Image: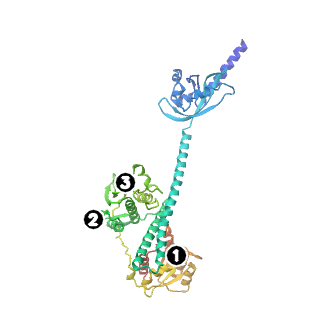
Amino acid sequence: MQVRELEQSDLRENERKFRTMTELLPQPLFETDSSGKLTFLNRMGLHMFDLNREDIERGLNLGQLMESEVSLLDMAQGETEVPLKFFFYDVKCVTSNNVAFPATVYYSPIVKHNKFLGIRGFIIEISERVRVEDELKAARLKAENADMLKSRFIANLSHEIRTPLNSILGFADLLNDTTTTLEEQREYISYINSSGKMLSELVNDIIDFAKIEAGKLKITNKVFDLNSLLGDVQNTFTDVCKRNIILNVCLSRQTQLLVESDPVRLHQIISNLLTNSLKFTDSGYISVKYTIQEKTGGGADLLFIVEDTGLGIPDEQKDLIFERFTRLENPKQKQVKGAGLGLAITKNLVELLGGRIWVESEVGQGSRFYFTIPFVSYESNNEPIIVEELVEPKSVDWTGKTILVAEDEEMNFNFIKAALEDTNVKLVWAQTGVEAVEYMQQGTSFDAVLMDIKMPEMNGYEATRIIRGIKGKRLPIIAQTAFSMAGDKEKCLEAGCSDYLAKPLLQSALISTISRNIMNSGN
């Protein structure tokens, strides 16, 4: 009898230890009978499901706490052999307050004398794991979409580059035909110019996009007349508008509306939106207008509205149009021009200027693009606005003046030579930075220097520094370079250049820049 009492005492002690350990475990432990009714749920389980002991005593069923695609009991009932099988399934658990969370249930059948008595197991909450998995799935989908968009972008880009190239090379080849009339030659040249501008705009878009992606696109705020800027936009787009489209640019009643922002980027934003409207508007009108919008708490914004009577945009695509590499199609046209960067660049530019952009549109009813920029009015005590005018080539006579052209590409030098031919200036060609420096060391007198930056033997930065050491600060040295990324102009000026021209060069800009610098130097 004493031995039996000792055995029962040990059994009760072991059971107490077991219960204590299960109550202290950081995971919910449970047991059920063969019908699924809970016979045990430890303290952590009660806490997780917001229950108490009375809920268990009332006969709460495991199925009331979790939803599963399979029946946990059914899967376990057939397993009555030893060793017992171990199961685990992902389920959705629901607390008594109807708060749902994902979990994994690990369990095995309770079997005695080959009879199924229920299941025993534990529960692990997997909310964090599910969140990470969802983020990984979303990231993978985003990466796959990005790859698809990039592939589509490259295909579009290839088409957009080859189209103007085909025109340029094709019509240039036709100009070699000596039988072409003067009228045909002028027509071919206009096609070449138009295609060249199209190609230049595409390159500029790609460069701007690269600057934005690298976070190196700089905003240069200055005071300018908004009415004058919109007038320039109207003049630019009046010629390209289709005959059955009316372009209406609404200006302020004031003679001038002086504001402070980046006029180049604002011009680009409006131009991009007008270009987009032209692609999808076959008839009707396109308008640009603006208003000053007071803000709560002080200050104001300039609100611009670009409206058209085009095809409109489906609701599901209104957010996509501002994504990079995305391009909507006009079903009435064989092919919509563009690489899918214009509106993405526009959105980024608006945000860099401190504003926001959005669109309202209805299919078949046209679109209305809105964007804002901070309104900073021009104070009268600021410095006056300086308007730079381009100098007409035929109005310049540089007889007796000599310019050193440091340029390693013969084709580029020949363009400069042709562009300046009517100015009667004398040009001296240095094909490397070393040659340019040698001319200065020989004491040759020059009125200005056109300095390419990327040259063999010695680059333009180094050549400029050496020439400054020889000639001082008075000699105008104008950088003329294909480097046009953010910071390139500043780098040229830091090296000692007086001014900066980005290739491709235009005759009017070239002559104006040289004229201004020669005039400022007193040469």
Q: Nearer the viewer, residue 459 or 89?
A: 89
Residue under the point 50% across and 75% down: 496
Residue 329 shows in this picture: yes
Q: How far apart are the alpha carbons under marks 2 and 1?
A: 44 Å
Q: Residues within 10 Å of mark 1 (few under 14, many from 20)?
A: many
Q: How far apart are the alpha carbons under marks 3 and 1?
A: 47 Å
Percent position (x, y) of residue 46? 54, 28
Q: Nearer the viewer, residue 75 or 259?
A: 75
Mark 3 belongs to which amino acid? Gly
Q: Residues within 10 Å of mark 3 (few under 14, many from 20)?
A: many
Residue under the point 38% across and 58% down: 280
Residue under the point 35% across and 70% down: 385
Q: Could you tell me which secondary element the residue under label 3 belongs to?
A: loop
Residue identifier under label 3: 312
Residue identifier under label 2: 254
User: Looking at this rendering, what residue extends furthest in the bottom direction?
Assistant: 400
